[in-house]
Image: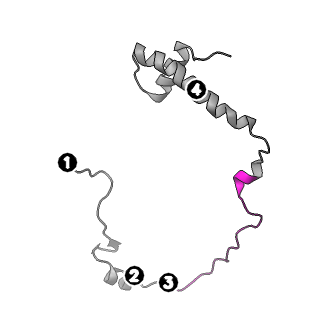
Amino acid sequence: MKDRLTKEEVLHVADLARIKVNEEEIEKYQVELKQLLDDVEKVNDVVGYDEEILIAPWDHDADLRADEVGEMINKDAVLKNAPSHSGNYITVPVVIGESEGA
C-alpha cells in the first residue's frame, strides 16, 4: 500500500477546496492527506458496527401533541408591546450585511 498521494491527487483536492498550493505544500500534503485518509478508513474496521445506533440511541419515538387551532392574537396588542414598529410590521435591528470596521 502506498504511503503518499500522487501530486495529481493533491492538486485535485486543492482545486476542490479552492486553495492554491506551492510545491513544498504539495509534498507535505501528499503524506498528510494520505495519513488522514488511512485514519478515516479505520472506521470500516470497527467490529459490532450497528447503523441503527446512528439513527437514535433509544427505542421509543417522540410523543408529539396534536396541533390545535387557538385564539388569534390581536394585531394592535402585539404592536403595542413591540419595542418598535413601522405600520403593521415589527422593526428589528439589521444583523445581516453589517460588519464592524467596514
**Residues packed near mark 1 inside 10 Å, few (<14), some (14 to 19) or many (20 plus):** few
Q: What's under tag 3, amino acid-wise? A: Met
Give the structural element (helix, strand or loop) at label 2: helix
**CA distance separating discs 2 and 4:** 61 Å
The amino acid marked with disc number 1 is Gly
Residue at numbered disc 3: 72
Q: x, y (%) of residue 91?
A: 30, 69
Residue matched to label 1: 101
Q: Residue furthest right?
A: 48
Q: Across the whole image, how many numbered discs are drawn on residues? A: 4
Q: Which residues are magenta?
A: 53-72
Residue 51 on image: x %, y %: 76, 48
For image coordinates 23% across by 51% down, the residue present is 100
Tell me the element at label 3: loop
**14 relative to 61, above or below:** above
Question: Label 3 vs label 1: CA separation?
Answer: 43 Å
Mark 4 or mark 3: which comes first in sequence?
4
Q: Position of residue 82 (x, y in %)?
A: 32, 78
Q: Hey, which quadrant is residue 56 in on the image?
A: bottom right
| Residue ID at (33%, 54%) | 96
Instruction: Examine the image and state in which quarter residue 47 appears.
Output: top right
